[in-house]
Image: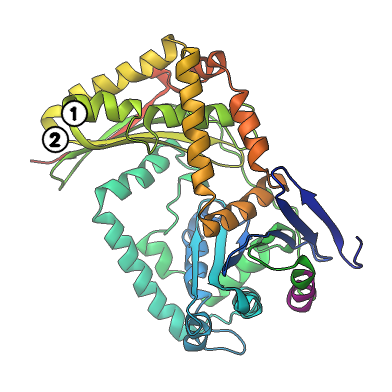
Amino acid sequence: MVLVPYICRNFVYTQGMEYNFLELKNGIRIIHKPVKSEVAHCGFIIKTGSRDENIDENGITHFIEHAIFKGTKRRKAYHILNRIDNVGGEINAFTTKEKTSIYASFTKPHFERALELLTDILFNSTYPENELKKEKDVIIDEINSYLDSPYEQIYDDFEELVFKDHSLGMNILGTVESVKKIDKKKILNFIKESYLTNQIVFSIVGDFPFKKIEKLCKKYLNEIPEKTNDKKRLPFEGYQPVQKEVKKEVYQTHCILGNVAYSAHHKYKNGFILLNNILGGPAMNSRLNMGIREKYGFTYNIESSYTVFSDIGLFYLYLGTDQKHIDKSIKLVNRELKILREKKLTPSQLQKAKQQIIGQITLSEENNCNVMLGMGKSMLLYNKVEGLKETYKKINAITGVELQEIANEVFDKKQLSSLLFSPNQ
């Protein structure tokens, strides 16, 4: 099927699941997953995050994500917030290091309402000066509240430690000083340079015929002016492990160990997702939880995570414990890492680990809002959405030898950085 002036094609995947794809003449891409539900979700996912900022505009992407709801050429903030709320829906947004998402959840009859509103606030926001002033106070309060939470702060401070002097290390919220310097002129200049139509995806999960989606996207998005440039992200290079301890007003010691890891395009990405799940994923039977919390009771919260960026990744291992247990806890963590480096998983262990993560992925498909956001992210990174059977196939192809190679690279004790927040008394 060809629909001029569109480039239009459908992706048909396994299990009878169809993902519909449409690229408009201005470069905006639309991805749709049909599901049988009275609830639908849609949103714009934009390839612009805090890593795309200069140091003197740190926090501006997050600031825009707030300010975008404060008024358009035809709506005041009150009308924006009520447009979806009045029909029982929700509208929201968030910012990461590499993307901004603006989205809505609503009942099926209100898709056009959601699409029109999201388009209006993304492309027609006016950023009134009086609203910007109020929002600065809100964001400064947000910064101060996160400084009151060492569990949250230590993750951001660890990224700053690892990605020193690089935009990936800058805090998404910015600083109190940088937020105070943001004004309407800076916002409009940043949007002009960074919000590019060929780096915007509109993602939909809902029970709609694709012809309806084509028609409405043509109505609201086709006349958005094309905007592109050749701006490229500065890659991070030259990682050096670093150890740091900070004395703070805390009751327990917070610790993060970590290392740089694989990018979204690396052949070992899926293998490390599996290995991290074995080590300290969300399940109660992770090695960290079983080997440290359950066995010794040293820590209430212990976990590991893996953040994937377009050109690099970051592995974090977090634990919080009483100061008297910190040395023993770190020793036990290093023991678990050593086991994964030196001992290949048995076929039975590997099969159980694969079965677990496949189950987790399948359960996550029940959250259609997260599926919608994930589709948009996948389109930005890979220009495609992968079906579940293809994902399962890649997981099942991972070998024990591969996991051991990954463990020896990422869990190398000499390459691990550490950050501790310790009580100052």
- Which residues are drawn in magenta? 214-222
* Residue at the disc numbered 2: 322
Instruction: Say left or right for 120 vs 26.
Output: left
Where residue 131 appears, x then y in whole percent?
45, 82
Name the element at disc 2: loop
| Residue occupying image coordinates x 61% and y 33% | 392
56 lies left or right of 157:
right
Q: Dot 2: within a 10 Å radius of its alpha carbon, few (fewer than 14), some, or many (20 or more) residues?
A: some
Question: How far across and down, in percent of the image, does residue 43 sit?
Answer: 60, 65
Asked if the residues shown at circle 2 and circle 1 are in contact, with their CB atoms under 8 angstroms apart, the answer is yes
Quarter of the image containing the C terminus? top left
Q: For the point 63% across and 36% down, which residue is it?
A: 391
Residue at image location 70% in from the left, 57% down from the top: 199
- Residue 283 x, y percent position in the rendering: 37, 36
Q: How is the image coloured?
A: rainbow
Q: Which mark is residue 326?
A: 1
- The quarter of the picture where residue 194 lies is bottom right
Taking depth in this image into account, of 220 and 42 the one nearest to the observer is 42
Identity of the amino acid at label 1? Ile
Most common SS among magenta residues: helix
